[in-house]
Image (cartoon, rainbow, N blue to C red):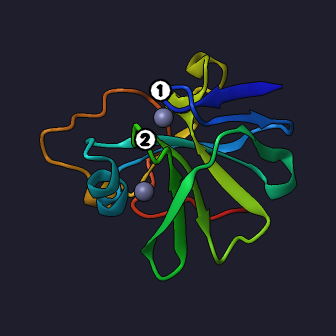
Amino acid sequence: MLIGGCFCGKVRYEVLGTPFDSTICHCVDCRRATATPFVAWFSVRQSEFRFVLGESRSFASSRAVLRTLCPDCGTHLTYQHADFPDEIDISTCSLDVPEQVPPEHHTWMSQKLSWVHVADVLPKHAGSYSKP
Ligand SMILES: [Zn+2]
Ligand SMILES: [Zn+2]
């Protein structure tokens, strides 16, 4: 089981399922919402994720996307897209041990900042990763 939570510790979660689509997202919305150059996410089935402590706050970063964060410290925790109602994405670096879920690819390379130089050998997708 994977466990994680926000920086201040008031919101905690558990992940019961097996992660898939672990990615580093370079999209503008992730960048602006988190004020970081890119964000690492992984997915699990909706039923395999649960908050176990505290109350997260959610907001719609676009019409189809709902993000949750800690209302106190602001750590971004989850991402849900209306097109994939059975999936929830979790910010990899909110895990207690982010090393447990290394990224498998990069997404939205078309929106990457010019001063971010990706030197790894992972697959790079111009847009979102098309789910098989
Ligand atoms: Zn917090
Ligand atoms: Zn993104």
Res 47 quadrant in image: bottom right
Image quarter in which the C terminus is found: bottom right
Query: Quadrant where the N terminus lies?
Result: top right
**Rendered location of residue 79, percent (x, y):** 56, 57
Q: Nearer the viewer, residue 43 or 62?
A: 62
- Left or right of 77: which side holds 27? left
* 26 to the left or right of 2: left
- The image quadrant where one finds ligand 2 is bottom left
Q: Which residue is mark 2?
A: 72
Residue 26, disc: none
Q: Are marks 2 and 1 in contact (CB under 8 Å)?
A: yes
In the displayed structure, would residue 80 be above or below residue 113?
A: below
Q: Amino acid at mark 2?
A: Asp
Type of residue at label 1? Answer: Cys
Determine which quarter of the picture holds residue 96. Answer: top right
- Some atom of ligand 1 lies within 8 Å of the CB belonging to the residue at label 1: yes
Lower position in the chain sequence, tag 2 or tag 1: 1
Q: Position of residue 40 (x, y in %)?
A: 48, 39
Seen in the picture, residue 82 relative to 14 is either above or below; the reply is below
Q: Position of residue 56 (x, y in %)?
A: 58, 50
In percent of width and height, residue 92 lies at: 55, 34
Label 2, label 1: how many angstroms apart (C-alpha)?
8 Å
Q: In the rendered view, tell whether residue 120 sits above or below residue 65.
A: above
Residue at x 29% of width, y 61% of height: 28
Cβ of mark 2 under 8 A from ligand 1: yes
Q: What residue is at 39 percent from the left and 27 percent from the top?
A: 120
> Residue 8: which disc?
1
Judge the density around disc 1: few (<14), some (14-19), many (≥20) Cα neighbours within 10 Å: few
For label 2, the SS is loop
- Circle 1 SS class: loop
Name the residue: 37% across, 55% down: 30
